[in-house]
Image: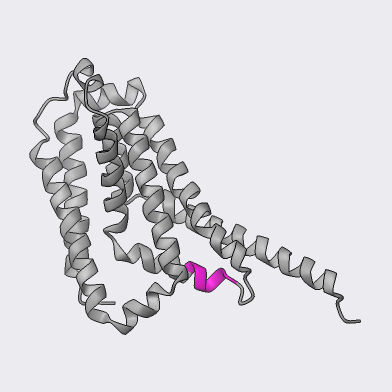
Amino acid sequence: MPLGTGAEWKLSMNDTWLALLAICGALSIGVISPGPSFVMVARTAVAASRGDGLAAALGMGAGGALFAILALAGLRIVLMAVPWLYVALKFGGGAWLAYLGWRIWRNACKPLAAADEEMKRPPRALSRSFCLGFVTQVSNPKTALVYTSVFAALLPVSFPIGAALLLPAVVFVIEAGWYALVAVALSSPAPRAAYVRSKRWIDRAAGGVLAALGIKLVASAGAI
């Protein structure tokens, strides 16, 4: 017996929600995996302030939403059709991560600013933390390919345009939500005190990880 119009619509909506849940699950697993974004947000939260960490988390969410929009627009097809663009993005992103790691390593021996001085910092400091999070997020073009791969694998052919427009917002919530939890947890007194005691070694480890990831990204620029 053929499905009526109402039944077809209900089945379509069920498929849509199942696809959204599958995408959320896949992206959530990817987000919580350690990487340069985690290192950057964690260090910002303990070295600067909770507000800076949350601002960086929002930057991560904005970067993830941008990747989602580009993925829906067919970024993978563009990068595959124009190989030099992908190589340029990998070089640029890798260079940024290496530079960020070098900066953290270089300042490892510098003491933290006094708490009262931190409270007097101009409001634009939070915007800088937001930009730092955003640039760190979009510095790795491989993340864009992850988004396009997940969407290609899990989005049904008849995915409604309304649900597609909702995806960037969902990605923002997943990315910003996870890194906000990281920022809140690591800006608490105990983690911050531990960071102050071992700042030199923690910063050198964080800087080394970011620099190594950046160098690896540059070195792999020839492979798509």
Farthest top residue? Answer: 116
Residue at image x 27%, y 30%?
123
- In which quadrant of the rendered view does residue 203 lie? top left
In the displayed structure image, the side of residue 150 where residue 16 appears, left or right:
right
Query: Residues in magenta?
Result: 150-155
Q: Is residue 15 left or right of residue 181?
A: right
> Could you tell me residue 172's position as x and y percent?
46, 50
Instruction: Please determine whether, in this image, residue 109 is positioned above or below residue 215.
Output: above
Q: Where is 200 relative to 68, above or below?
A: above
**Main SS category, magenta section:** helix
- Residue 114, above or below 103: above
> To which quarter of the image does residue 30 belong?
bottom left
Q: Position of residue 1 (x, y in %)?
A: 91, 81
**Does residue 81 sit above or below 59 in this rendering?**
below
Task: Say left or right for 186 vs 10.
Answer: left
Looking at this view, name the residue that lies furthest to the right. 1
Q: Is residue 216 visible?
A: no
Give percent across and percent down for residue 211.
16, 53
The residue positioned farthest toward the bottom in the image shown: 81
Q: Residue at x 55, y 56 (%)?
A: 25
